[in-house]
Amino acid sequence: MSILASISVDGKHTMLDTTALSPITTLPVLTTNMKTCILERPTEDAAITPEALFGIICKKIPRLTLGGSPPLLSQVQSHTKKRRKAHKRDAVQPMIDLCSRYMLDNLKKRESYMEATVNMI
């Protein structure tokens, strides 16, 4: 007689003890509040790393600032990557503004130089 048992056959539960519950294996989930934390934090510090965000979230959970169980680091990294990809222009906007001002200033200087040259002739 064999003691081996199959847990499921064709999707049907076939354990020997039919009253035993299957173990629940769910991954932690990023809650809406955690996602909001990930979205708001880079506006304060653009160079913040996903690891630092993960640490912040993990500290807030025991303090009951955020609800739920701690997420996986890979979930925080993935969400941070998506956010940065979606807001890439926001990250370079200060540089775009600086370059635009520089170009405008140079254009004004060039126009005034041209006027001075024309007035000299």
Image: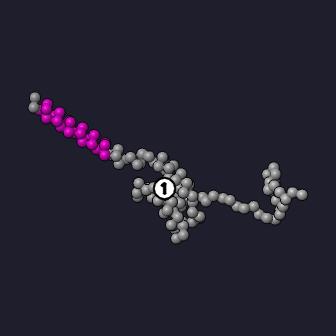
What amino acid is labelled 1 in the image?
Answer: Pro
The structure residue drawn at horizontal position 31% and vertical position 46%, both measured from the top left corner, is 98
Q: Residue furthest toward the left?
A: 120
> Per the image, is 56 magenta?
no
Q: Which residues are magenta?
A: 98-119
Using the image, determine if residue 24 lies above or below residue 117.
Answer: below
Q: Is residue 43 visible?
A: no
Location of the C terminus by quadrant is top left
Q: Is residue 41 visible?
A: yes
On the image, the x and y values in percent for residue 53 come to 48, 59
Q: Residue furthest toward the front?
A: 1
The structure residue drawn at horizontal position 28% and vertical position 40%, both measured from the top left corner, is 103
Q: Residues within 10 Å of mark 1 (few under 14, many from 20)?
A: many
> Per the image, is 115 magenta?
yes
Residue that label 1 marks: 50
Lateral position of residue 64 relative to residue 4, left or right:
left
Residue 101 is drawn in which quadrant? top left
On the image, the x and y values in percent for residue 14 come to 83, 57
Q: Determine the secondary structure under disc 1.
A: helix
Using the image, determine if residue 94 lies above or below residue 22.
Answer: above
The structure residue drawn at horizontal position 81% and vertical position 49%, both measured from the top left corner, is 10
On the image, the x and y values in percent for residue 115 come to 16, 34
Q: Residue furthest toward the bottom?
A: 63
Q: Residue furthest toward the right?
A: 1
